[in-house]
Image (cartoon, grey):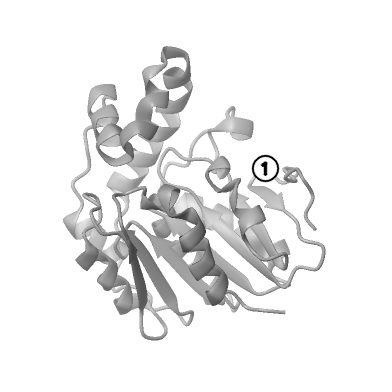
C-alpha cells in the first residue's frame, strides 16, 4: 500500500514511499521536464519499490531557484541529495537528458564508494558518444519549439498556450544550454553497475545504434530493449517498459 500523495519535503525529490521498501528507484527527467513525468510510475511498480522522482531546480515547486548552469553542478548537487537515501539498493533511471544526469550521478556515487545496483537509460546515447554526434537546436524560442514539436509530437501542444509557454521556456532553454556545454572530460568512466538501455525504434534524437554506446561504460554486458515509437515512446508503452524495469530491480 502506498501513500496517495508524494512527499516533497526535500525539494530535490517527489518521494513516493513504500510501506516496506526494498529498493529505491531514482528517476531523472528529460530536458524541460519535471518530477511529474514519473507521477504514474509508483502505482505501476511493485509495492516494494520506493520511487524518488527528481525535481531539477528552476521548475514547479522549485520555480524560484536558478536552473543548474552545468551538468557537473547538477550531478554534484543531486549526488549529495541522494546520500540520505543510500540505505537501500539504489537504481537510477533517466530519459533523454536524464540519462546523462543519471550516469553522472552514478559515477559520483561509485567514486565515493556507494553501490549503484543498476543504471537504466532511455532515449540517449552514452555521454562521451552523444556529445560527439549531438546537433543541438538554437536557443531562441522558435528553434526550441520546433525541436520540442519534432520530438514530442502532440504532447508539445502545451507550449501553444502563451501563459504556460512563459513558464516552461526558461527551464527548457536552460537544460538545452546545459546539454550544449556538456562535454565529459577524458576517457569515459566505466561503472561497476550494469547498464540497461531503452529506446524507440524510430527516435530521431537517438538512433538505435546510439544505445549500443552504453556498452562502453557498463560494468557487465549491456542489456537493450526497443519499443515501437519515437523519442517519447515510453508514454505509449509505459506498462511494458515498467514491467521490464521491475524485472531488473532488486527483490526483497
Residue 178 in which image quadrant: top left
Could you tell me which residue is drawn at 29 percent across and 50 percent down? 230
Could you tell me which residue is drawn at 24 percent across and 50 percent down? 205
Q: Give above or below for 82 relative to 252.
A: above
Identify the image quadrant of the C terminus: bottom right
Q: Is residue 220 left or right of residue 138?
A: right
Q: Give above or below for 146 relative to 43.
A: above
Task: Name the spot of residue 38 as percent of width and height, x first.
Answer: 56, 48
Task: Name the spot of residue 148 as percent of width and height, x first.
Answer: 31, 35
Name of the residue lying farthest toward the top? 162
Q: Is label 1 in a helix, a strand or a loop? A: loop
Q: Nearer the viewer, residue 50 or 60?
A: 50
Q: Give above or below for 93 relative to 8.
A: below
Task: Name the spot of residue 16 as percent of width and height, x first.
Answer: 71, 52
What residue is pinned by disc 1?
11
Identify the image quadrant of the N terminus: bottom right
Residue 247 in which image quadrant: bottom right
Q: Give above or below for 130 relative to 86.
A: above
Amino acid at each position: 500500500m502506498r501513500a496517495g500523495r508524494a512527499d516533497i519535503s526535500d525539494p530535490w525529490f517527489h518521494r513516493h514511499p513504500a510501506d516496506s521498501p526494498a529498493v529505491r528507484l531514482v528517476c531523472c527527467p528529460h530536458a524541460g521536464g519535471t518530477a511529474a513525468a514519473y507521477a504514474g510510475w509508483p502505482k505501476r511498480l511493485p509495492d516494494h519499490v520506493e520511487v524518488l522522482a527528481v525535481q531539477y531546480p528552476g521548475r514547479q515547486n522549485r520555480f524560484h531557484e536558478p536552473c543548474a548552469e552545468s551538468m557537473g553542478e547538477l550531478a554534484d548537487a543531486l549526488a549529495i541529495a541522494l546520500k540520505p537515501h543510500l540505505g537501500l539498493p539504489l537504481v537510477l533511471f533517466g530519459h533523454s537528458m536524464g540519462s546523462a544526469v543519471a550516469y553522472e550521478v552514478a559515477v559520483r556515487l561509485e567514486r565515493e564508494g556507494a553501490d549503484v545496483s543498476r543504471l537504466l537509460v532511455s532515449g540517449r546515447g552514452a555521454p562521451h558518444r552523444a556529445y560527439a554526434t549531438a546537433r543541438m537546436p538554437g536557443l531562441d524560442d522558435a528553434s526550441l519549439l520546433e525541436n520540442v514539436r519534432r520530438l514530442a509530437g502532440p504532447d508539445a501542444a502545451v507550449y501553444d498556450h502563451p501563459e504556460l509557454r512563459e513558464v516552461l521556456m526558461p527551464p527548457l532553454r536552460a537544460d538545452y544550454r546545459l546539454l550544449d556545454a556538456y562535454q565529459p572530460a577524458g576517457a569515459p568512466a566505466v561503472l561497476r553497475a550494469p547498464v540497461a538501455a531503452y529506446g524507440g525504434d524510430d527516435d530521431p534524437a537517438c538512433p538505435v545504434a546510439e544505445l549500443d554506446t552504453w556498452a562502453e561504460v557498463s560494468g557487465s554486458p549491456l542489456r537493450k530493449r526497443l519499443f515501437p515509437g519515437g523519442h517519447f515512446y515510453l508514454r505509449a508503452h509505459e506498462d511494458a517498459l515498467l514491467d521490464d524495469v521491475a524485472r531488473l530491480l532488486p527483490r526483497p
